Every structure is written in structure tokens, then in C-alpha cells.
């Protein structure tokens, strides 16, 4: 078990016996509070986001001897969260300055920045989540919304949508393990749920739309385009 604290340290426990956790050596690193943690799926690499505007990468394969591998930054304010997609090849950091940066961490000792930062335009990036297939990045923001990007190609992320999720700040965003549902919550004490898969959403819309548009209706209202009914 690993946890970041307000002194900038990573605290480590041996959980072989969950009823009697054994403290392991504490790891110093950040020069401020640790605000977010992210792991590779195999649990060998840890990323921490901290109030000193940095994201740090650690080798935690041996919990008795945690090693700092690299430090990245470029943010103008707190680094609030860090996330690593399921393939373990990319590190994503979000900041209070509204920026999200992506790094290639195929070699975690030498992270490589991938393009310019993503921006939520206004507000702060408070939390990040990546879908189970690794293709969608969600960012909870203080600007009342969740931002979604397609990161199937992390070198060229594409903005998918911005979802209104609260009357005020959005603090948490999560994907369910099956990858069908995304949830978000914030300061309005409400949890919002979305089925974020476009194909599923399209089927839901079509099921409520009634009879599909006919060829005659298409010719009348969609002149100049070949017949391609959105619902069949």
C-alpha cells in the first residue's frame, strides 16, 4: 500500500497481512503536498502529482527500496493528479492552471513530452481518469464540467465533448471497470452518470425517435445528399 502525504513523502506499507500492515521506508521527493497518485497496471511504476507543480515517477517494484526515476513539470500551478492508461506507456498530469500534459514513459527514467498541453480553457483540472480500453481521457474541472478526449493516439489527442456535471466544481470522475459508464461528482452533492460510448448512445436515441426517416422524407428534407438514415 502506498499513500502520499502533505509533507511530500510517499508512505509505504507491507500488506501481506492486511490485519497487521507493516510500515516500510518512507520515500521523500516532493517539495509540497502530494495531491494525486497513479500506477501502471502491473503496479511497478508510481506517479505522484504535487503542489510544487511537478509530477514524479517512481519504481516501486521493490517496495522495500522505492526509487525516484524522473521528475516532469511545465505547469504554472499545482499538479493535482496523475494517471497512467492501461497499457502503461503514457503518463498524464493535470494542473490547477487548466493544463493537461502527456508524456511517453516507455522508458520511465526518460519521459518524453507528447505535443502541446491540452487545455480546459477555464478553471482547474482536479482529477483525471482513463477508460479501461485506454482510449478516452476524462478530466474533472472546477468549471462545472467533465472534459473528454480521445487519446487512442496519445501524440494527437482529440477533444470529444464537454459534459455539464455540477452546479459548481467537479472533483471526481471515474469509469466503471467494464468501460460502459462514467460517473462524476462535485460540490453540488450529486453524482452524475453517463453511458459515454457513442454507439450505445446512438441506439438509445434511435430507440426513442420512432420510425426511421424514409427515402421520400430524406429527399424532401436532406436534398443533395445520398440516403443515409442515422437510425435503421
Image (cartoon, rainbow, N blue to C red):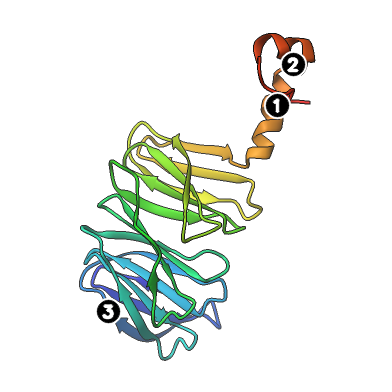
Name the spot of residue 31 as percent of width and height, x first: 20, 73
Along the line of sight, which residue is nearer the eye, 2 or 121?
121
Quadrant location, the C terminus: top right
- The local crowd at label 2, few if under 14, some if 14 to 19, many if 20 or more residues have their Cα within 10 Å, is some
Instruction: Determine the residue located farthest toward the bottom in the rendered image.
Output: 65
Q: Which mark is residue 115?
A: none
**Residue at image mark 2:** 213
- Which residue is denoted by mark 3 in the rendering? 29
Q: Secondary structure at mark 3?
A: loop
From this view, report whether residue 192 is shown above or below residue 217.
below
Disc 2/disc 3 C-alpha distance (Å): 61 Å
Q: Is residue 2 above or below residue 172?
A: below
Percent from the top left, x then y, of residue 127? 39, 53
The answer to whether 227 appears left or right of 51 in the picture is right
Q: Residue at x 53, y 59 (%)?
A: 153
Residue 63 drawn above or below residue 79: below
- Asked where in the image residue 36 lies, by quadrant, the reply is bottom left
Q: Are marks 2 and 3 in contact (CB under 8 Å)?
A: no
Q: Residue at x 41, y 91 (%)?
A: 65
Instruction: State the SS at label 1.
Output: loop
- Mark found first going from the N terminus, 1 or 3: 3
Q: Label 3 near label 1: C-beta < 8 Å?
A: no
Q: Are marks 2 and 1 in contact (CB under 8 Å)?
A: yes
Compared across the picture, whether 4 is left or right of 211 comes to: left
Query: Residue 182 occupies which quadrant of the picture?
Result: top right
Q: Which sits earlier in the primary sequence, circle 2 or circle 3? A: 3
Q: Which residue is mark 1?
A: 230
Label 2, label 1: how many angstroms apart (C-alpha)?
8 Å
x 33%, y 66%: residue: 49
Splitting the image into 4 quarters, where does residue 142 fall?
A: top left
Residue 136 as seen in the image, left or right of residue 105: right
At label 3, counting other C-alpha atoms closer than 10 Å, the crowd grade (few under 14, some 14-19, many 20 or more) is some
Amino acid at each position: 500500500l502506498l499513500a502520499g502525504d502533505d509533507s511530500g513523502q510517499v508512505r509505504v506499507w507491507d500488506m501481506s497481512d492486511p490485519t497487521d500492515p507493516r510500515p516500510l521506508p518512507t520515500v521523500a521527493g516532493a517539495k509540497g503536498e502530494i495531491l494525486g497518485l497513479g500506477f501502471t497496471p502491473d503496479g511497478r511504476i508510481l506517479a505522484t502529482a504535487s503542489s510544487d507543480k511537478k509530477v514524479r515517477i517512481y519504481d516501486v517494484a521493490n517496495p522495500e527500496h522505492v526509487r525516484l526515476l524522473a521528475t516532469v513539470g511545465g505547469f504554472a500551478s499545482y499538479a493535482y493528479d496523475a494517471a497512467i492508461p492501461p497499457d502503461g506507456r503514457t503518463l498524464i498530469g493535470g494542473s490547477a492552471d487548466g493544463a493537461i500534459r502527456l508524456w511517453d514513459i516507455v522508458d520511465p527514467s526518460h519521459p518524453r513530452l507528447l505535443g502541446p498541453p491540452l487545455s480546459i480553457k477555464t478553471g482547474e483540472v482536479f482529477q483525471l481518469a482513463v477508460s479501461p480500453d485506454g482510449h478516452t481521457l476524462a478530466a474533472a474541472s472546477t468549471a462545472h464540467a467533465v472534459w473528454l478526449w480521445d487519446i487512442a493516439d496519445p501524440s494527437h489527442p482529440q477533444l470529444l465533448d464537454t459534459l455539464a456535471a455540477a452546479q459548481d466544481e467537479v472533483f471526481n470522475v471515474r469509469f466503471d471497470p467494464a468501460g460502459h459508464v462514467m460517473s462524476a461528482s462535485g460540490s453540488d452533492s450529486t453524482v452524475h452518470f453517463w453511458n459515454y460510448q457513442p454507439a450505445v448512445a446512438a441506439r438509445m436515441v434511435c430507440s426513442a425517435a420512432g420510425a426511421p426517416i424514409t427515402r421520400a422524407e430524406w429527399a424532401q428534407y436532406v436534398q443533395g445528399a445520398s440516403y443515409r438514415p442515422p437510425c435503421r
